[in-house]
Amino acid sequence: MHWYKITPLDLLLFRDCKPFSPGEGSWAKGLFPPMPITVFQALRSLLPQTTTKDERKRRNLSFIGPFLLDSNHTLWLPTPKDLVCLYPPGQDRKTKSDNWSEIQFLQSIPQDDVWRHLAFDEEQIAPLVLNKKWDGNISPPKPWIKAEALFDYLKGQKNSSNWEKKDFYHNPWKTQVLPHIQMQPDKRQVKDADGYFTEVAIRLEDGWCFVAAMSGDTLAKESIVRLGGEGHRALVSPLSADDRLKGQLDCLMKSDRSSTGSNFAYLLTPGLALFAETRYSSYPQAWKEHLKGCATDKALLWGGVSTMRKDNKTKEEFALLPQRAFVPPGTVYLFNNEVATNQQLLPEQGGRWLETFKQLNYGKLLWGQGI
């Protein structure tokens, strides 16, 4: 696996999978950061074009990413969803978001008299709660965490008192609304139907970029790729990393749960959990009996238009991808003593699409201990 830095040269546009049609009130939302397959296809476009089936098989490469890197070569990852900031009474978390007094872990519901009158749906796992009396405001921390702080968290070296403000960062981008207008032929008027819609684009802060790794031969020293919609471009270059950053990237490649005391898992990349044949959930049905709790967020809906090439064809054809509900990165699973055997949060059975997800490291789990 070779690591690359992907630096946007302009704003970026990644539509979500919600269908829409131009017209009054149409609004195409965006999804950011992009899904792994989007960045993988951009990197793979730098490889030589193929004409035979054997050549196409050599393009079935492994991939992991993308992750955020700032101008100081600090790696940032999604903040674990089981962390909550506690603000002193009278403190407004919206205006002074960094002035929390401590950070607590969400926990499974205690078996004591305080909680004994509460009942929950038996078909679902019980929710995680803040097991501490608190009179002030509470709120999740900022959405990005330093990789160093995340690894300490996974090792059980973080408690309520030794988190630092600099461990977290807000979303390092701004949104930009792009209006699209189609005029009537030979007139200075917008079309009455299908004439107007808007899209939401992203502009990263100065110095920020993506990093991702792909197998195969090392790509050219520097190359330009199309990344996302509207033909926007990004600069791809081999990543020059110091020893500190190399060590962090190596840790991302591991998914070993064999260490003693591994009782929770952190989701590094978007996962896919089938609770039933046609029903997506935040955790697989097979995990239910092993789980003490799950801290997650709303699903990432992804699918839509793509291209495909059949084995007996030489040209790519139009295709529609099924829309799936992916579990967002940063989701945390708390297990009982008997831990589920899966190394990735993916269905156990599937066709070629499942093999693709495995090669692109969807549902990558990092295991931790000490919670």
Image (cartoon, rainbow, N blue to C red):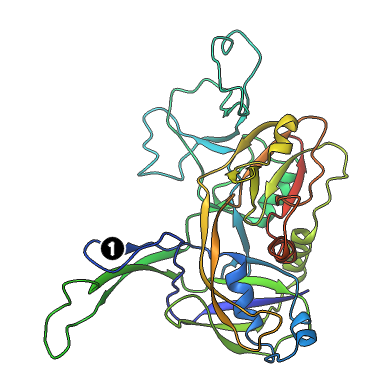
Q: Residue furthest top?
A: 113
The residue under label 1 is: 26
Please state which of residues 269 and 71 is positioned toward the viewer in this rendering. 269
- In the image, what residue type sits under mark 1? Ser
Q: Is residue 177 visible?
A: yes
Please state which of residues 203 and 314 is positioned toward the viewer in this rendering. 314
Q: Is residue 278 left or right of residue 369?
A: left
Label 1 sits on a secondary structure element that is loop
Name the quadrant containing residue 293.
Answer: top right
**In the rendered view of the protein, which quadrant contains the N terminus?**
bottom right
- The relative height of residue 43 versus residue 92 in the rendered view (above or below) is below
Please give the name of the residue rendered at 61% of the width and 89% of the height, measured from the top-left corner.
223
Please give the name of the residue rendered at 80% of the width and 85% of the height, measured from the top-left corner.
54
Residue 327: x and y, percent? 59, 49
- The relative height of residue 307 versus residue 35 in the rendered view (above or below) is below
Q: Is residue 5 left or right of residue 336?
A: left
Q: Residue furthest left?
A: 188
Please state which of residues 198 and 143 is positioned toward the viewer in this rendering. 198
Please give the name of the residue rendered at 54% of the width and 14% of the height, measured from the top-left corner.
118
Residue 225: x and y, percent? 56, 85
Badge 1: residue crowd in 10 Å (few <14, some 14–19, many ≥20): some
Q: Is residue 72 visible?
A: no
Residue 58: x and y, percent? 78, 82
Residue 302: x and y, percent? 52, 60
Please give the name of the residue rendered at 63% of the width and 89% of the height, measured from the top-left corner.
222
**In the rendered view of the protein, which quadrant contains the C terminus?**
top right
- The relative height of residue 284 versus residue 30 in the rendered view (above or below) is above
